[in-house]
Amino acid sequence: MSVGLVGCRGGQERASKERDENGVSHALRTEGARLSRAIDQLRAADNDRKAALLERLAAEPCEELCSLKEVCGGAYREHVAALDAIRTARSLTAELSAEPGDEEQARVAAQLEEAQRRLETARERSGECLDEQGAVKLRLRL
């Protein structure tokens, strides 16, 4: 039994060290494909599913492409935070009295400003994510 396990490990190690005609290891291409797939799913998801898919991306292991994971994770953390700020603003708006005071209006305005700021940051970072992901896909020929 243990001989079979050693043989399997040796095969895995050899496969991870093997490189294609472009010098890309199988392990790197696999990591790139896995992370890219998780990012694509996150990008395409409805807003209600983004938080859960962001957690899945965060849980993905990385060896060589951690920068891609971090850039894209940061973009979508901002996006999810903006969605949370919008939900909070809606909740505060629903709780407003018939004639809201300055303090109530200021709280709603502050939440909307936070949402706007985070959406702008998310948009910028999403562009960086797309650029980084595109570069990885091109380099690894995914």
Image (spheres, rainbow, N blue to C red):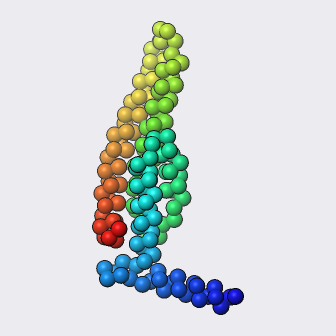
Q: Position of residue 120 (x, y in %)?
A: 34, 40
Q: Is residue 44 visible?
A: yes
Where residue 42 sits in the image (x, y, percent)? Answer: 44, 51
In the rendered image of this protein, does residue 76 appear above or below residue 34?
above
Instruction: Please state if 107 lies on the left or on the right of 126 as rendered.
Output: right
Is 52 situated above or below 15? above
Looking at the image, which residue sits at the far bottom? 3
Position of 102 with respect to 129 (left or right) is: right
User: Residue 58 location in percent, x, y?
Assistant: 51, 56
- Which residue extends farthest top? 99
Report the number of numbered marks.
0
Residue 64 lies, in percent from the top left, at 43, 70
Q: Quadrant of residue 72?
A: bottom left
- Residue 22 drawn above or below residue 7: above
- At horizontal 36% and vertical 78% (from top left) the residue drawn is 24
In the picture as drawn, the residue positioned furthest to the right comes out as: 1
Vertical side of 96 occupied by 13: above or below: below
Quadrant including the N terminus: bottom right
Report the residue at 58% width, 85% height from top.
8
Residue 65 appears in view = no
| Residue beneath the point at 65% across and 91% down | 3
Location of the C terminus (image quadrant)? bottom left
